[in-house]
């Protein structure tokens, strides 16, 4: 985006409802043998009262990245007590 926007621009923006048509996973094969699946999940959309160089309105989104590690090689998994020392789930 060539022009920055301010907090005032966000306050004046119109919240736009949306329907989910498709949310696909992006799949990445890491060099350590793990497969990462990543998906962006849209949680909100606002349309600014500003426009891009092509005349299209500028949209700002709120989203969450969902990340899953699958096919993790056994040698990378924690081998110990009940749970790993640091868990983030």
Image (cartoon, rainbow, N blue to C red):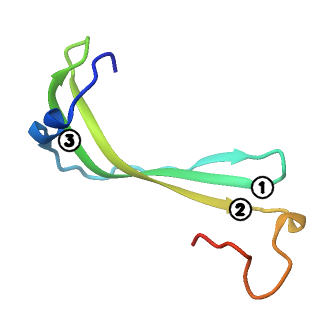
- The mark lying in front, picked from 2 and 3, is 3
Q: Is residue 88 left or right of residue 51?
A: right
Mark 2 or mark 3: which comes first in sequence? 3
Residue at x 57%, y 51% (from the top left corner): 38
In the displayed structure, would residue 36 be above or below residue 60?
below
* CA distance separating discs 2 and 3: 34 Å
Q: Earlier in the sequence, mark 3 or mark 1?
A: 1
Q: CA distance from mark 2 to mark 1?
A: 6 Å
Location of mark 2 (residue): 70
Q: Is residue 74 left or right of residue 59?
A: right
Q: Residue furthest right?
A: 75
Q: Within 10 Å of the Cα at label 2, are there few (<14), some (14-19), or many (20+) other Cα atoms?
A: few
The residue closer to the viewer here, 24 or 7, is 7
Residue at the outermost top position: 53
CA gap, disc 3 and disc 1 = 36 Å
Q: Are marks 2 and 1 in contact (CB under 8 Å)?
A: yes
Residue 35 x, y percent position in the rendering: 73, 54
Quadrant (top left, top right, bottom left, bottom right) of the N terminus: top left
Q: Nearer the viewer, residue 12 or 74?
A: 12
Question: Residue 25 appears at what percent x and percent y?
Answer: 55, 51
Residue at image position (34%, 49%) is 21
Residue named by callout 3: 46
Q: Earlier in the sequence, mark 2 or mark 1?
A: 1
* Residue that appears at 71% across and 62% down: 70
Residue 61 picture location, percent across and down: 30, 42
Determine crowd level at label 1: few under 14, some 14-19, many 20+ residues with C-alpha closer than 10 A: some
- Residue annotated with mark 1: 34
């Amino acid at each position: 985006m060539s022009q920055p926007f301010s907090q005032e621009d966000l306050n004046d923006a119109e919240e736009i409802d949306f329907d989910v048509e498709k949310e696909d996973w992006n799949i990445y094969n890491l060099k350590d043998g793990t497969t990462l699946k990543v998906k962006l999940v849209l949680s909100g959309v606002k349309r600014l009262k500003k426009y891009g160089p092509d005349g299209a309105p500028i949209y700002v989104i709120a989203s969450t990245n969902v990340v899953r590690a699958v096919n993790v090689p056994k040698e990378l998994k924690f081998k110990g007590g009940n749970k790993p020392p640091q868990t983030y789930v």
